[in-house]
Amino acid sequence: MNAYHYIKVIYNMKFNDKIHNLLGLRLNIETFNASLKELLKLNNYSSFARTEILIMFGATTLGVLWQPLTVSVIVFGVGFIFSSLFNIPSKEYIPFFAISLVLWQFLVANMNEFSSKFSRPGEYLNFPYPKLILYLISIISKNTFILILNLSVVLGTFIITGHKVSFLSWLFAIYGLFLYVLFIFGVGVVISILGSRFSDIPNIVQNFIQIMFYITPVMWTPNSINKNWVYEYNPLYYALSLVRDPLIYQSFSSLFYIISSCLILLIWIFALLFWSMFAWRINYHGK
């Protein structure tokens, strides 16, 4: 049974009518079905990533090597300085900073692109709205490929500093990375719709992320401050922990990953419903 069958079941339950009566909105079945099909096509991600990377680095001498090279300079340059400022041994701080920075850069790149993709007129105006999700798939594909390249820097810091990670920790970290990408993609789908309607959203997102950077353990470690509330109520701290904790602290809880998986599933249910209700308005707002 395909996605369209399940949507027909929803129709038979008069779910769409209930939404319309409650919110004055309707679920666009064509958009939902087309978007779900494109999201599940794995070849979309590889083809878009390859195309975007060629556009970004095709004319450079070092090509994609520029990305990990740039991150390496920041990690080791800033890492040695801040390890001294925080009075933390560099072999402990640099691996922490490396994985934190790489994950944060991935978040920033995606949020900025998602929020601004439909905020200004572009080629998408003449694109059939049921398949506008392809533009978002292109964004997450490119940035995920860059993320994987940058993770080679993290691996390099582990080797140089002698930081050892158990096999089980690697498994949890890989699954956590999968959840982290899904989390950012799901939130990005919602933000892209808001950005198409409100032109101020890209600026709001940029400023919000800048503030969150200072209250999220990226440059500083959770153990370096006494005020635990600074990060304990910060959802981005837990998002980073999905990948960082198994690798840095060899710490992981099955319950934490089960709860995270359920929350991200709920985010995606909301994101798909939200997208299916408002994607048709992107072309209208863009004009």
Image (cartoon, grey):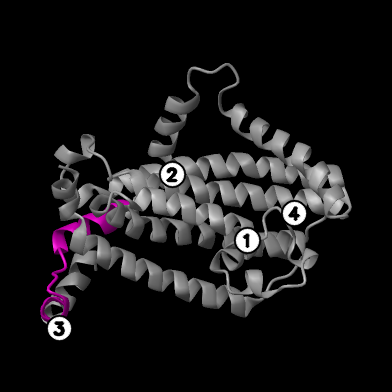
* Front of the two marks 1 and 3: 1
Q: Cβ–Cβ below 8 Å for labels 3 and 4?
A: no
Image quadrant assignment for residue 63: top right
The amino acid marked with disc number 2 is: Ser
In the rendered image, the vertical position of residue 277 relative to residue 74, given as above or below = below
Q: Position of residue 72 (x, y in %)?
A: 71, 36
The Cα–Cα distance between marks 4 and 1, rounded to whole angstroms, is 13 Å
For label 2, the crowd category at 10 Å Cα-Cα, with few meaning under 14, some 14 to 19 and many 20 or more, is many
Q: Which mark is residue 141?
A: 2
Queried whether the magenta region covers residue 183, the answer comes back as no
Our reading of the magenta stretch's main secondary structure is helix
Q: Residue 216 vs residue 182: left or right?
A: right
Give the mark nearest the N terminus, 3 or 4. Answer: 3
Queried whether the magenta region covers residue 26, the answer comes back as yes
The Cα–Cα distance between marks 3 and 2, rounded to whole angstroms, is 36 Å
Residue that mark 1 sits on: 216
Give the mark nearest the N terminus, 1 or 3. Answer: 3
Query: Between 41 and 279, which is closer to the camera in this rendering?
Result: 279
